[in-house]
């Protein structure tokens, strides 16, 4: 499907966007705000200061969260690297953009996020992990596959956290960048910010770090601040973790010792990127831009870290799909935590709303900017949708099931190919240790969720086989 054909289709929006799209107001100053959008890879919301059973030290992020707006129910619709990036850049669900696995490439069938900001008068930049192009780690020449990002500094082989590789953005020449990868990416981002000090245009910069994504190899000073043997596990961790639930090249986590070592590296990586986040904030201060720049910190998905007997992501559980989303906006809410549901698909339209840019009609999510700015008239979503694809044609590195699901403020529900799978009461059971899917008392709730999933699939062109799946209960373990 090409761009023109897609835009002619009337079914591009989903029931998640049932409310009218509303563009955010122009800032009171009359000037467009700069936008710094920072996201790491695999940073779960549970690994933040103040969260139960967390031991990660992240003083800069903790301070930023407490002083600004924290969307505490931010959900990754498809908790996997490329599908999330496809959602972020296109504003479409994976089944609409056809980015349903890490092996897919995002095609320019709709205006990309950078293109929308560029057309609104912004100078756009991207630094770090790209992971959207056929043959990850290849140079992307100028053109539609940069999706409107002019100043383009994408990196190759981002799982290599030291002495990484990037490209000359004009010629494509490969460049070795000695040192710790997030630090060198932040160097590039700071250079971008410094270069905009006297610029006539507002700017929009995306910074994408790979850690705390594995391998868990942060600088020794960050790793060694944690005593592996003293780290606590979440109550829902199950050991041993089967080999097919572990992403290569991790060793089989057959003992608490190996799991604690993974935790040690994971927490150390969070502390390392926390320092880089502080550098970005300082660059804004040094250039006199802090008061006219909105800043976001978030992540593409979480990390199971042994919960429910899994590592990595791609699961409907909270450790996999609930992520940080913190916003500092000159006119936004301060020192406020919101439990309003907010999902990956809402980010593109919401960034537009926060910047005072009309939301493109193709976006499938909702503009939540009015809520984030504390304005009246916002009606929140009752539910957000979850998905994952797995099969012979889409084999990832880890054994996870194909499913479709729903996350409400109170419950998580998911259906697999072989039947209804899990239902959790996240209020009464925050660690999701009691699967209620076969409890007759929940019959009406499940029927409502089934109907919503079927309607969402029809709206977004999803081909999940509900007719056969809803005839039974899944045999796949639920917790």
Image: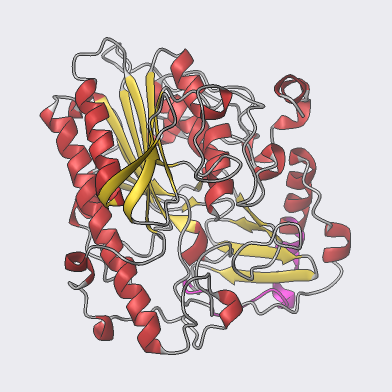
195 vs 113, left or right, is left
Q: Residue drawn 65% across and 55% down?
A: 387
Q: Position of residue 152 (x, y in %)?
A: 40, 29
Task: Choose between 472 and 408: the one closer to the eye.
Answer: 472
Q: What residue do we see at 38% from left, 64% from top?
A: 46
Region of the chain picked out in magenta, as a range: 430-448
Give the quarter of the image for residue 193: top left
Residue 234 horizontal side relative to residue 194, left or right: right
Name the residue: 71% across, 71% down: 421
Residue 275 part of the magenta segment = no
Q: 397 or 399: nearer the eye?
A: 397
| Residue at the image point whose x is 64% and y is 77% from the top | 478
Relative height, residue 305 to residue 154 (above, below):
below
Residue 352 on image: x %, y %: 46, 25
Extreme left residue here? 286
For the C terminus, the image quarter is bottom right
Up-down relation of residue 25 to residue 36 (above or below): above
Residue 54 rendering spot, x and y as whole percentages: 30, 70
Residue 191 spot, x, y in % from top left: 23, 30
- Can residue 23 be seen in the rendering of this structure? no
Whether 4 is drawn above or below 397: the answer is above
Left or right of 123? Residue 106 is right
């Amino acid at each position: 499907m090409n761009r023109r054909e897609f835009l002619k289709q009337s079914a591009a929006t989903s029931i998640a966007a049932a409310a009218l799209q509303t563009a955010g107001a122009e800032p009171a100053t009359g000037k467009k705000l700069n936008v710094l959008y920072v996201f790491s890879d695999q940073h779960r919301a549970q690994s933040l200061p103040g969260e139960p059973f967390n031991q990660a030290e992240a003083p800069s992020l903790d301070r930023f969260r407490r002083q600004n707006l924290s969307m505490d129910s931010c959900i990754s619709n498809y908790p996997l690297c490329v599908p999330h990036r496809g959602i972020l850049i296109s504003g479409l669900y994976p089944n609409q953009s056809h980015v349903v696995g890490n092996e897919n490439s995002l095609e320019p069938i709709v205006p990309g996020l950078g293109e929308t900001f560029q057309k609104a008068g912004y100078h756009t930049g991207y630094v770090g992990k790209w992971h959207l192009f056929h043959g990850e780690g290849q140079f992307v020449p100028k053109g539609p596959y940069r999706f409107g990002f002019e100043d383009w500094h994408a990196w190759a082989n981002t799982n290599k956290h030291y002495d990484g590789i990037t490209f000359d953005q004009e010629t494509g020449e490969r460049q070795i960048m000695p040192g710790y990868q997030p630090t060198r990416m932040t160097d590039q981002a700071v250079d971008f910010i410094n270069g905009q000090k006297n610029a006539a245009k507002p700017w929009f910069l995306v910074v994408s770090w790979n850690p705390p994504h594995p391998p868990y190899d942060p600088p020794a000073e960050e790793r060694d601040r944690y005593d592996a043997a003293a780290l606590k596990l979440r109550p829902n961790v199950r050991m041993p973790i089967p080999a097919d639930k572990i992403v290569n090249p991790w060793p089989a986590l057959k003992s608490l010792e190996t799991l604690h070592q993974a935790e040690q590296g994971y927490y150390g990586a969070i502390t390392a990127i926390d320092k880089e986040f502080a550098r970005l904030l300082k660059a804004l201060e040094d250039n006199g831009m802090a008061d006219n720049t909105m800043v976001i910190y978030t992540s593409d998905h979480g990390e199971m870290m042994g919960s429910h007997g899994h590592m990595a992501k791609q699961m409907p559980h909270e450790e996999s799909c609930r992520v940080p989303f913190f916003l500092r906006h000159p006119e936004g809410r301060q020192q406020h935590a919101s439990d309003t549901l907010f999902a990956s698909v809402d980010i593109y339209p919401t960034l537009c709303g926060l910047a005072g840019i009309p939301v493109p009609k193709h976006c499938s999510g909702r503009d939540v900017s009015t809520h984030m700015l504390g304005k009246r008239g916002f009606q929140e979503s009752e539910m957000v949708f979850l998905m994952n694809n797995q099969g012979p044609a889409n084999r990832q590195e880890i054994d996870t099931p194909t499913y479709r699901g729903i996350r409400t403020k109170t419950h998580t529900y998911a259906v697999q190919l072989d039947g209804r799978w899990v239902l959790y009461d996240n209020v009464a059971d925050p660690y999701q240790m009691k699967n209620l899917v076969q409890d007759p008392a929940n019959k009406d709730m499940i029927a409502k969720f089934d109907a919503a999933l079927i309607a969402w699939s029809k709206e977004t062109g999803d081909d999940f086989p509900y007719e056969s799946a809803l005839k039974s209960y899944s045999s796949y373990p639920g917790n």
